[in-house]
Image (cartoon, rainbow, N blue to C red):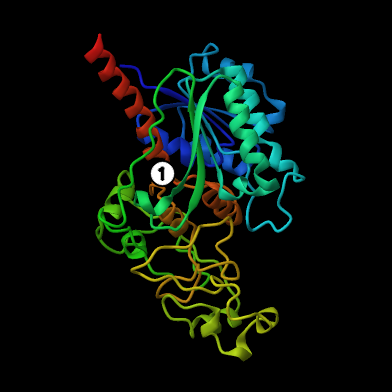
Amino acid sequence: MNKPTAIDLFCGAGGLSEGLNQAGFSILAGNDIDTFAGETFAKTHREASFLDGSIRELSAEDFLKATGLAKGELDCLAGGPPCQGYSVYNHQRGMHDERSHLFREYLRIVEGLMPKWLVMENVTGIMSAGEGEAFQAVLAGIKSLGYAVEAQILRAEDYGIPQERRRVVFIGNRIGMPIVWPKKTHGDGLQPFTTIQDALSDLPALENGEDGGVSTYCSEPRSEYQRELRAGSNAVHNHAAPRLGAINIERMKHIPQGGSWRDIPFELLPAGMKRAKRSDHTKRYGRMKWNGLSCTILTKCDVHWGAYIHPEQERSITVREAARIQSFPDWFHFEGPRTEQYVQVGNAVPPMLGRKIGEALRSAEDWCNVENIATG
């Protein structure tokens, strides 16, 4: 039986592609304007064609030519148009930001390819930006092309990912299939949430600023999560600690697991934070808890932005640790300068969530096949 096919627009490093691949899809092509992300995608999805550059300069015909498909043959078009225009971290967010309109480029390619299924992912801010204008425009645009579509907010931690991450996912199809959503696997009454300890405890210790190069694991897998992500890898890559200044190291010494900037003596606080209310900046200078979840992995794992201090070591987390928290397998190596590697990890759909979405699409078709057999 042939694998279902997928193309990933705005693919970045390929987190969603990797998840769909794990769910049994054949990834035929990806596109992104980010050069370094494209290098990572190309090296981790060798079976796929990578079309670089702005989506505005590409046509559906370019994708058909690259994949050898005809219009209507693609099983799934996936993508996450850049979300900075909607992000809650963008205080000028809204429909005036030109990035807020890139979803129209996604819809243009949908119209040209007419895939059987489509999956689109974005930040939850799309639901409120422009008083919900973008969210309603996406739904209306998809429906106008003849697709049934639904949208839900999915929480990464509900699917075994050790991170508090909320994303809006749109799923649609034009072939009369039911829209099936991935079932939660972790949380109350289900499996316990995957913790930071489950995710990171087998990675080698590092000093502030230390780059151990390609290194060995410090132990055998200590959790099922580690065992799964280590499959296919015999070494640790992208594991180097950013070099923080002496004042930040001194601040960290006062922060316990689960603590934050509030635990730093007043005289050591940055000038701006000395004026902050105790209720403000709740994640800044946060130290992770071994038995807790990570805050959302962003494009900078900067201690000034959130809780990115290692649970025990006096340093911020590495690219590999961020990738583990995002559920990337260890064989998945990130290309480019380290700052760009963080961007690739932070922008990605967690592969484990992508896999759950892919499995849901396939289960919808399997369900219909069973129904057709039963009534045929």
Of the 4 image quadrants, the one containing the N terminus is: top left
In what element is the residue under mark 1?
A: helix
Please provide percent x and percent y for residue 83: 62, 46
Query: Looking at the image, which is closer to me, 166 or 252?
Result: 166
Q: Where does label 1 land, which residue?
A: 353
Quadrant of res 138: top right
Position of 171 with respect to 292 (left or right) is right
Kindly give the residue lying farthest to the top in the view shown: 376
Kindly give the residue lying farthest to the right in the view shown: 96
Of the 4 image quadrants, the one containing the C terminus is: top left
Quadrant of res 33: top right
Kindly give the residue lying farthest to the left in the view shown: 374
Residue at 29% over, 18% down: 369
Number of numbered markers: 1
Query: Looking at the image, which is closer to me, 201 or 166?
Result: 166
Query: Looking at the image, which is closer to me, 62 or 128?
Result: 128
Position of 65 with respect to 175 (left or right) is right
Residue at 62% over, 84% down: 269
Give above or below for 139 relative to 269: above
Please provide percent x and percent y for residue 311: 41, 72
- Dot 1, crowdedness within 10 Å: few (<14), some or many (≥20)? many
Residue type beneath disc 1: Leu
Position of 19 with respect to 218 (left or right) is right
Position of 346 with respect to 35 (left or right) is left
Is residue 85 at least partly visible in the picture? no
Is residue 262 at least partly visible in the picture? yes
Please provide percent x and percent y for residue 314: 47, 76
Please provide percent x and percent y for residue 202: 31, 62
Quadrant of res 365: top left
Give above or below for 119 relative to 227: above
